[in-house]
Amino acid sequence: MSGTGELLKAAGDFGPFQKWLLVLASLPCFSLSFHQFCQLFMVPDVPHHCDTSWIRALGPNLTEEEQLNLTVPRGPSGEYEQCSMYSPVEWDLDSIVAYGLNATQECSSGWVYPADHEETLVIQNVSVHLNDVFQYSLTMGVATVFAFGDILNALGEFGRFQKWLVVLLSLPVPLTAFHMLGQLFMLVDVPHYCDTSWIRALGPNLTEEEQLNLTVPRGPSGEYEQCSMYSPVEWDLDSIVAYGLNATQKCSSGWVYPSTQTPSLLTEFDLVCDKKDLNDISQAVYMLGLLLGAMFFGPLSDRIGRRPVVLVSMLIQGLFGVAIAFVPDFYVYMAFRCVVGASMSGITMTILALAMEWVGVSYRPHAVLLSHCCFAIGQMILAGLSYGIRNWRLLQIAGSVPIFALFFYFWVLPESARWLMTKGRIEEAKKILQKAASINKRTIPPGLLEQLKPEAQTKPGSTMDLFRKKHLRKVTLIMLCTWFANSLVYYGISLNVTNFGLDIYLTQLAFGAVEIPARASCIWFLQWFGRKKSQGFLLLLSGLVCLIITGIPEDQPVVITVLAVIGKFATSASFSASYVYTAELFPTVVRQTGAGLCNMSARVAGIIAPLIRLLGRYHRAVPMAIFGSAPVLAGLLCFLLPETRGMDLVDDTSAAAPQHRSPENTNRTSENGHVKAKGGGPDKECAETTYF
């Protein structure tokens, strides 16, 4: 560590490079004041009273003042109460006027605000507690006069435009695998013992073995202790050799790593003994970044769009990913990794939404699972890259710099036309749709484009809608459990790659390789067995495999690794299924908010997973038993969800579930015949939307 300080002095403590880096790192700070205090101006107090429109059914000609006088009590100051109303009764209007109302209650049907006040977050009636956490989760939806699936029919459900878009969105995915799992190869455990160079002052000619024999105690196995040493004494060397040392203590002068040739996180920051747990804690901090990113970027992409969130997330990941390679302290390393984790959530969540909203119903799984296969390829690349580059700083740079090659996205990445429609930006949606149709060599009928206009403003979709509506509440709670269990078992297996007993690079290669058939076979599972059964059975399989591992002896590393690979197969396929299933279950106006909540649940599990590994010090079977129990329970809950195979995406929260596409919609044909099924009748076309 002292060598790093000397290098910094030689390079210059605060030269142009450091000044440039400081200025660059300070740029995001300008927006911090906005995000810190902007809510103060979004939630100003405005006059309001309970919505008592129930009395309009009895007296439709009542003036507003008469309605308030009959249904809202007055306070001590003579003003109408803002948070209470008279309880509705089943009397006629004459009886209410004659006898009046006495019983009061809290507002049960919302509030009314004067028409001269602009809309604010308060007027949108957001829960105060959720407003503190999800203040950007509101999405202003616009009802359209036809299903967006009709446009995709005319456009082509998976033409050249969509194929090009899916490939484009898959390019950053291999890099996310590096940031997710790269630390496993930067913190590989190596032999070490206490630095006992104090004895060199007494015997400068001692060999390394003689020094260890005199100053480091041996454990029950006969090996030198790694975290303790004999206490230094003021004897001469002959006395130490003759009488030996007895009193022991913890390492007080650092550690020595005799077999290490290149610096790693472990050797550079001494992450051994009392600091050993920082390895798992740093992984938990990274997962915390994923959680914060899910909380922030999910609602943000619903508000400002998919494209800007992807671009901003890529920039953050690139800058902080490279900056990690230059950190002088492990705690700074963990802080930067947290930021990188947040940006990764922004990338993965938003490219999922963008792909799902451009691709037709029959090809949604293909689009999502292709990006997941790219994540598996990234894991395989990580195994080779970490094997060839052992210096952790160079490895970090090699895994972070390639993201900058993707900034041509600024000119070529399109916005989601479906999102533009829900925001009322119809002209922009038309331009993008026409461009996509020209790339697909299709023609969208002019009459269909003319219908692409807002009809009426719908109630804004918000986080509360996920729990206020009964059908969405059940879906949300079960999917939260599903994502939690998926994430727990996935990271429980993936982060344990160094403890299965075989070569870590080969094991990582196998883990990456098995994910490709797992992700690809998921398409087949979803096609033939449906979303619900596939999700449930894959979770059950991954959990049962982990439970079996708990009973395998430690001296059977091959058996344990084979079972772990099977578990990795099942949980990878289950994770892919959950991405598709989640996007199909939630309506457009709250899709990213719902996906954000599910990601939050997964990230909570990701935070817990490395901490659960610490329980292995009490019994090695405890972590795997926990990793196996959660997916078994979640798999059983999945059978309570509705099936979404072959159904159109729902745009607002009023529908109870995704709806099957009607034969009329499916066979709607443009003048040039581009939409018509090749095989003919309605029955066949409906089947083609159900099966791939």
Image (cartoon, grey):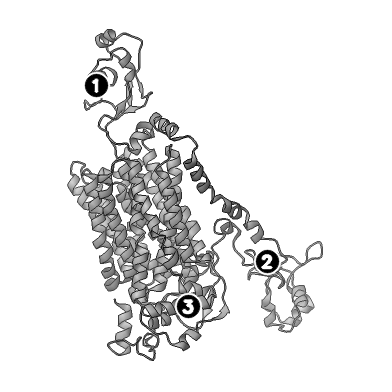
- Which one is in front in this view, the residue at disc 1 or the one at disc 3? 3
Question: Label 1 sits on what residue type?
Answer: Glu
Q: Nearer the viewer, residue 507 or 564?
A: 507
- Residue picked out by circle 2: 105
**Kind of residue at badge 2:** Gln
Please tell me whether mark 2 sits on a helix, a strand or a loop: strand
| Callout 2 crowding tier (Cα within 10 Å): few <14, some 14–19, many ≥20 | few
Q: Secondary structure at mark 3?
A: helix
Q: Residue 566: percent from the left, percent from the top?
A: 23, 56
| Disc nearer the start of the sequence (2/3) | 2
Nearer to the camera, 63 or 170: 170
- Amino acid tagged 3: Lys
Q: Name the residue rendered at 54%, 64% in the picture.
A: 464
State which quarter of the image contains the N terminus: top left
Q: Give the Cα separation between the discs numbered 2 and 3.
A: 51 Å
Residue 622 found in image quarter: top left
Of residues 471 and 356, which is closer to you in this image? 356
Q: Give the image location of residue 553, x and y in percent.
A: 20, 43
Q: Are marks 2 and 3 in contact (CB under 8 Å)?
A: no
Closer to us: mark 2 or mark 1?
A: 1
Q: Residue 357: x and y, percent?
A: 42, 72
| Residue at the front extreme, as displayed | 16
Give the residue number, with chain letter if any, for mark 3.
431
The tag earlier along the polypeptide, 2 or 1, is 2
Density class for disc 3 (Cα within 10 Å; few <14, some 14-19, many ≥20) is few
Q: Position of residue 656 (x, y in %)?
A: 46, 75
C-alpha gap between disc 2 and disc 1: 83 Å
According to the image, label 1 marks what residue? Answer: 208
- Residue at 48% of width from left, 34% of height from top? 13
The reply to whether residue 334 is in sight is yes
Q: Is residue 491 above or below residue 415?
A: above
